[in-house]
Image: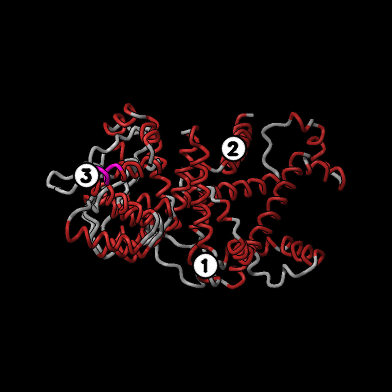
Amino acid sequence: MNERYRENMHIPVPSDTKETDKIKAITIFTLMDSPLLKIIGQPEATNIQPMGQLVYDRLRYSLAIGTRRIRSLHRMVIRSTDTGIININCVDPLGRSALLMAIDNENLEMVELLIEYKIVDRLIADHLIALVLGKVVDMFKDEFSLTPRDLTSWEAVPTERATFTPDITPLILAAHRDNYEIIKILLDRGATLPGPHDLRCGCDECVTSRQEDSLRHSRSRINAYRALASPSLIALSSKDPILTAFELSWELRRLSFMEHEFRSEYQELRKQCQDFATALLDHTRSSFELEVLLNHDPSGPPHEHGERMHLNRLKLAIKLKQKKFVAHPNVQQLLASIWYEGLPGFRRKNMALQALQIVKIGLLFPLFSIVYILAPHSSFGQTMRKPFIKFICHSASYLLFLFLLILASQRIETVILDLFGIPPGDQEILDVDPTIRRGSPPTLVEWLILAWVFGLIWSEIKQLWDVGLREYVGDMWNVIDFITNALYVATIGLRIVAYYQV
């Protein structure tokens, strides 16, 4: 190295040969422009080795790790163990120890060597970061034991040198990576992930966090929900993964409307929860397994084959707007088989035969209804419980009800009297204008309409009793039915008042 180059590099000319090694090492660092220069640090007070040799040895140690020279590293570790020349637990400017750099390089042989010589004494954070990275699980899971404090307060380094923000715990990081093995190890060792506070929470912790840094507060909530939405974490920590995915998806939907700035991220996490719940349906191998899954009720007995299917889980999916779950082919196939139960071969018939069978059932609905009222548990009465047959009968009944309303509005009794003749004593009745006639007793058609109205009201009362007031009001069709029935009752009441007062 000539004098001019040394002058440009601001390297002093050695006054004696004792500084040669030191200048050599500093020159190498300068030429490489490497951040590993900071790894040297200050020599120990008790170290009596020359500065040049110390710097040079640490440089070789760091380069051996960075360039994956396992043999050179092995020799230096043995030498350091015997003499203590090199601080084998030194870190680079990024806060990475030798072990963590070896893991980043995915050099398993070097990791095995460092673990063998117990180069894991710096901070428990190194263990946890290395473990969560998921590259050396089998090596690490028996090398150390975590305490409850380690599982939460794991970044024992200053914030400016920390690898992750303080809210990122090992379990959260493992859940972000969706690493099943790592999550299981941490959960088995007692790690927990408490749910984030509500968006409008007014506790001292949330108020202080928002005042100090509102962005970090929002990002910490997103990080927590991103971990909670991990399929592996849901599968390992929840007794009812589908219910957990449904509820979390609904909560993320609510947050997406409340935090508009992060709406896309919340919607992405919601989609992840929906995909996880839907993917579980692919693992059902038979109709019975699918029935058990869709009829599961946490507060009730398990579903048995042959029982009436209430489909509680499917109803919950509809309530929480899980469209992918409801639209899954397995679910649709089961619903189709339930819908057409009682009509074997109906779907394989052509349209003409299907229409003929529908008309036949529609015309026989009065007979079906009478049998169901008299003997509801008979085989013929049970036919009325089949969904498609019940739908046809209800449709035919409502069409007949509309037909009766049309007849009543047209004063069909007067039309019949005109067509078939009028008894001599009833001629005065027709002389009165029907549009101004009040207080007349109900006709036969109106009595039939009254019976239908009572039936509709009774049906709504039964539905209200079954689902509860909150769910009943939540369906707009029920509100429309209630208003319609209320108008029917009001009309009947006015007719009664007119009958007694006019």
**Which residue does the image show at 57% across and 43% down from the upper left?**
478
Circle 1 is placed at which residue position?
A: 283
What colouring does the structure picture have? secondary structure
The answer for how far apart the CA atoms under marks 2 and 3 are is: 101 Å
494 on left or right of 310: right
Closer to us: 174 or 103: 103
**Which residue does the image show at 49% across and 57% down from the upper left?**
313
Q: In which quarter of the image is residue 370?
A: bottom right
Circle 3 is placed at which residue position?
A: 18
Q: Position of residue 88 (x, y in %)?
A: 24, 54
Alpha-carbon neighbours of circle 3 within 10 Å: few (<14), some, or many (≥20)? few
Alpha-carbon neighbours of circle 1 within 10 Å: few (<14), some, or many (≥20)? few
501 on left or right of 414: left
Magenta span of residues: 19-23
Alpha-carbon neighbours of circle 2 within 10 Å: few (<14), some, or many (≥20)? few
- State which tag comes first along the sequence, 1 or 3: 3
Circle 2 is placed at which residue position?
A: 483
Residue 20 magenta-drawn? yes
- State which tag comes first along the sequence, 2 or 3: 3
